[in-house]
Amino acid sequence: MPSKASAALVNQYGETLKSVLACVIKQPLRRITKPYEFGRRHSLFLARGPAQLAGSQLSFGLWLSFSEFWNAQAYRWTIRQERYTYQIVDENAHELFAFHWDPLQDIAFPHLHLGFGMRGHQLPIDNKAHIPTGRVSVVDIISFVMLELRVKPLLDDWQTRLEVARQIFADLEG
Amino acid sequence: MGSALETSDALVIPEATEQDLQGSIDHAAQFYLGISGDDFLRRWHAREFSEDDSQAQHVLHVINFFRSAKGEAQLR
């Protein structure tokens, strides 16, 4: 049964996620929690997502689930990410990039959909094509948003936040 | 009182209320299609959206995320 120790891990995950998102977005997260045999599954999302990225025409949506469970081998509570969708949308509400991973869906591997961003490039695929990616973290996406899509960070310490978050997520899922 | 309830109350990310979920669905339907969440569901059940309507699929994705998070059957 989940304990205060496991709740502390969940809170560390939540605080870290909030810290990363705060680099580019002012929008609270909400949670749905469902218990299961070995722990609890938590699903997190932006309360009003997609939400506009500060100082940008782009919007961002995040929907992810992770579980807290008793890891009998390691003899400790562990966090495991279970699925995600990260979506970047243009000013006309058209999807530019969508990063998906849900092992329970027909397309079980992590993949990218290229939306309106591919228009005019004569690519031999459409926006439903599943481009393999490997697992993508929230930290990677927020880095991508700032460094490649040139969304201006809201916070001066964004680099530190991302570095710290990368380490915390690695530790929590280790 | 069970520890699961105590620890759930102590989590830093607030648990979504039904009002939160409805507000989020309304936001998504408005954002992608310019309609309310209720309108979306009515039109979805009436099969007014084609399977190629990616804007409708985005709204459906949000609804199904919530449904699966709660252990409910997904809309197809």
Image (spheres, grey):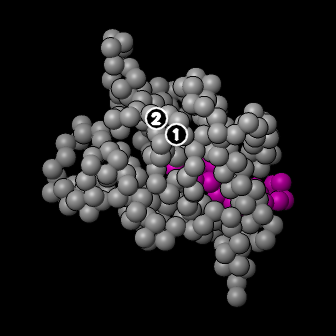
Residue bearing mark 2: A58
In the picture as drawn, the residue positioned furthest to the top comes out as A122
From the viewer's perspective, is residue A168 above or below residue A48?
above
Q: Secondary structure at mark 2?
A: loop
Q: Mark 2, chain letter?
A: A
Q: Residues within 10 Å of mark 2 (few under 14, many from 20)?
A: many
Q: Name the kind of residue labelled 1 in the image.
A: Leu
Residue A158 position in % (x across, y down): 72, 37
- Proximity of marks 1 and 2: CB atoms separated by less than 8 Å: yes
Q: Residues within 10 Å of mark 1 (few under 14, many from 20)?
A: many
Residue A100 in sight in this render: no
Q: Mark 1, chain letter?
A: A
- Which residue is drawn at the image coordinates 57% and 49% (left, top)? A26
Q: Which residues are magenta?
A: A63-82
Q: Where's the N terminus of chain B, which quadrant?
A: bottom right
Q: Are marks 1 and 2 on the same chain?
A: yes
- Which residue is drawn at the image coordinates 37% and 58% (left, top)? B25
